Image (cartoon, grey):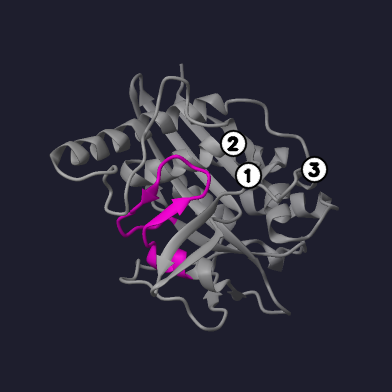
Amino acid sequence: MIDRAALDALARYTGRTEEPYLVAAIFRDHNFRQAIVNAVDSRWRVVHVTTVFIHKKPMVTFACGGTDSTCELRDALVVYREELRTGQRRAQAMLYQAKKWAGGGRGWVQGDEDQHALYRHWPPFEINGGQAGTISLPPGDYGRVLGITESSSPGDVPRVSPRRPTEPWCRIEEEKPWVQVLGTLGRSVREIVRFAFGEPVTGYWALAVSDMLSLRVGGASPGRSYGRTTARGGTAGRGPLARLAALAAVVAAEEEFHTLVDDLDEPPDDRAAEEFEAAPLSVLIIDAGPTG
């Protein structure tokens, strides 16, 4: 159902055909969002799906193989939040790097060398223009590749790469890498809701997601700050006080994440992606709460 809605959204779309715009066309489509509600809603929870655009597409800088690299975090972010009871919430999030299929093949897409290294190794990185400083993630499932095209035929349903373990060290390949895409976009959304894809929005992943969302709403909430961290996960300086400050920054980021998402609780952005100065990062927010 979700995949059919994604294809229908592409069939109705008549704008630019670069990857970010195709993703935005799917995420902002009402029927696509309703298909997610229909797939996730149940007797014990009520689901709301919202789309927002990060107007300043997040760029990241990281060191890899002895050199500094800069690339986009990429085209889409799916966030799922679940409230089991008052005061008890958990969240899951995953990035998507969209790439168009070349020729008639639908099983593989060709990626970008720097972005591939980021998603493959997850070295310490910094979101340009953010306030978190250097973010050092533990190994995890933070991002997948999304194969996509402007076609709406059933064989062209958007497909997602399988999970790959985070590899140690970091190196950038000399040629553009090929990435296999197998499962569908609809399946990946359902797996995020089941907490099987992506990673829990806690710790330094919360720091990263908060930094991305802060570019949309113009910064951290008034009176709140989650500080800057170094590549080793601490704030500037050394010693026990710096380590305590680093821990406080991460805890504040988890609280800030929910505050930022609450601030984004607004009707979906109905502007076409082409209206922005640069192709936006599309964010799909799925909120689930108990009935009654």
Task: Tell me the mark number nearer the camera, choosing from 3 and 1.
Answer: 1
Q: Secondary structure at mark 1?
A: loop
Foreground pick, 34 / 258 = 258
Q: Kindly give the residue lying farthest to the top in the view shown.
A: 292
Asked whether the beta carbons under mark 2 and mark 1 sit within 8 Å of each other, the answer is yes
Asked if the magenta segment contains residue 8, the reply would be no
**Residue occupying the point 59% across, 43% down:** 283
Residue 137 painted magenta: yes
Residue 162 in sight here? no
- Label 2 sits on residue: 216
Mark 1 neighbour density, 10 Å: few (under 14) some (14–19) many (20 or more): some
Magenta stretch? Answer: 117-142
Q: Which residue is mark 3?
A: 275
| Point 77% across, 37% down: residue | 271
Nearest the camera: 171 or 230? 230
Q: Amino acid at mark 1?
A: Lys
Q: Is residue 263 left or right of residue 235?
A: right
Q: Is residue 98 left or right of residue 244?
A: right
